[in-house]
Image (cartoon, coloured by chain):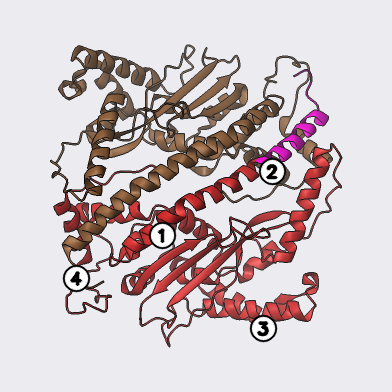
Chain colours: A red, B brown
Amino acid sequence: MSEVNAEEVNARFEELSILESEFEEVEIELIRKSNSLNAPLWKKRAEIIAKIPHFWTLVFEQAPPELDNFIQPSDSKVFVDCLQTFEVSRFEIEDPKGSPRSVSIKFGFGDNEYFTDKEIEKKFWFRKSKDWVGLVSEPVKIHWKKGKDLTGGLTDAAYELAQARKKLTKASNGDAKSKKDSSLPEYNALAKKIEESTEASLSFFAWFGFVSSYRWISAEESEQAEKEDTANLEKLKRGEKLDEDADDDDDEVDYQETEVFPQGDEIATLLSEDLWPSAIKYYKHSHEADDEELSDIDVSDVDDMDEDDSDDEIDIRGLVGKGRKSSGSPPPKKQRKA
Amino acid sequence: MSEVNAEEVNARFEELSILESEFEEVEIELIRKSNSLNAPLWKKRAEIIAKIPHFWTLVFEQAPPELDNFIQPSDSKVFVDCLQTFEVSRFEIEDPKGSPRSVSIKFGFGDNEYFTDKEIEKKFWFRKSKDWVGLVSEPVKIHWKKGKDLTGGLTDAAYELAQARKKLTKASNGDAKSKKDSSLPEYNALAKKIEESTEASLSFFAWFGFVSSYRWISAEESEQAEKEDTANLEKLKRGEKLDEDADDDDDEVDYQETEVFPQGDEIATLLSEDLWPSAIKYYKHSHEADDEELSDIDVSDVDDMDEDDSDDEIDIRGLVGKGRKSSGSPPPKKQRKA
């Protein structure tokens, strides 16, 4: 290097921006490749799992601390009582306008005392604004039974506000800039509920009300931001200067007044990129835990969730533990994450 | 499911073990694919970075907390003073007996007051024993200048013990079981040093002395364990029962008496799977940090590390910050990890 000056460092910075977009292309290709290679294995896994009672309950019980910290004892009880299936899919992977980073997370439940839903699905769309990129979602309605809402009305209030916001956007002909949603009664209702709730005991189920750790971004806004990014990148490649950015008013802070679960996108990432791919590992851990220490959830006194053999009271931990021992299958291993 | 019994759960457990090995094959294929797609981009990045002063210092400054917690202020000062290059490579990726998970992490340094080494490389081998799998390493000798050893002799003591262990293994004709390394004077010297050192102020450079979070595993032992795993898997696929495992005496606990950096493998993973692929992102964060808050390292009063332009005193944070602003390149984005 002959001399260091701002012009040169600046030029390097632009080269790095172009390179970053090439890394992103590779990353996208790898997600697609991973999805197509793993898809048949996930299918096979689901078939085996369907024959293992409480598989996903045991996996959630072994969730890493980053995730487990968000699961209250009362949430665990729901999983023990009635969680039957769990599924992650990249629902936009074939969609040229969508992103392979968008993800759907689906829970299947048996009959239970908490809600009437048999399936609760939460979708996350990978979207960008002028100065943010990440996962956004829409609040999902959970049909809680009377007096059984573990979130104290948070999911309902988040859902109501989202509906009201949609109407408002429609009324203003999609002109997002003109909408002032903080004047909505649903806004104040939710903001008040959040203020009153204590984060320490927030139910995991409040996660279904999550919108964004930034703010909601529509498909249209995201597409526009994508176009601008592409245009800027082309300019950089041709060696042209970009227009100065005007400082945008950032409404992120305000938006968080009505976010019921600020780390909702982190949870989505943990579920889809750790719990889902490593489910067998966590399931095996539950046997190690059985050998070495008492589980923090005692599932032996829980009603049998399988309808066909309701006569037998089953200690599922004892059973699978014994299964492993009598099989003499290879001892569980500490696996490094890929 | 008609009925739940131990035999059935047991059979499912074996099916899952077979499936797990198929997932592992896919994972290995994806690591190879990732490496071949990214290699040309890493090369291009290195060429750009070579022209950016303090690039890696700024990246390390923005390291995520999981990593940053292990970097003491005195370690940061070394990086600011003389870190010039940083390189991660999968050195066994073409080796049929090796693993694409094995990783080499190489630091390049300019002339400095701390040590005479121009390059310090730490290799991690992905190996397995009968009941563990993960990264192991050998202590690396750092040639500290007099009175400048940031680890208080830990890297030297770890290196000496490793050398003594090698001699011992050779003397016992490679019969690992017969070696009793706790009788070595080097063993006691290191165990004592570790007992005396305070973990809270442990230098990052002690990481170069890391061996294993379990215990050392030789290439031969790993190969043997791999063979047994493969044989067991074949048995399972043919529907045969496996032999009962004898309960092994586990020498992991003892071994940790002489481990200078118990989380060394986690650091290797953070460096190779986060800092290395996301370096541009962290570099850009250093500009955001420059805009928004004061850095915890003040590099403006540090001697210019570039030898060719020693006349100019350079405030590198100011410079690159300005570079970004005057370029009008797209604003930095919060990027979700892949």
Circle 1/circle 4 CB separation < 8 Å: no
Secondary-structure class at tag 3:
helix
Percent across and percent down for residue B65 are 52, 43
Q: Chain of mark 4?
A: A
Q: Identity of the amino acid at label 2? A: Ser
Q: Is residue A202 visible?
A: no
Residue A19 among magenta residues: yes
Given the image, on which type of amino acid does mark 4 rest? Ile
Disc 2 residue crowd, few under 14, some 14–19, many 20+, Cα 10 Å: some
Q: Looking at the image, can residue A87 be seen?
A: yes
Residue under the point 30% across and 18% down: B161
Residue that label 4 marks: A314
Both on one chain, marks 3 and 4? yes
Disc number lying in front (1 or 3)? 1
In the image, A44: left or right of B268?
left
Provide the residue designation for mark 1.
Answer: A43
Q: Chain of mark 3?
A: A
Residues at marks 3 and 4 touching, judged by CB atoms closer than 8 Å: no
- Decide which of tag 2 and tag 3 comes sooner along the chain: 2
- Residue A138 versus residue B251: which sits nearer the camera? A138
Residue that label 2 marks: A21
Mark closer to the observer (3, 4): 4
Which quarter of the figure has residue B9?
A: bottom left
Please report whichever mark, 1 or 2, sits nearer to the chain's N-terminal start. Answer: 2
Chain letter belonging to callout 1: A
Q: Earlier in the sequence, mark 3 or mark 4?
A: 3
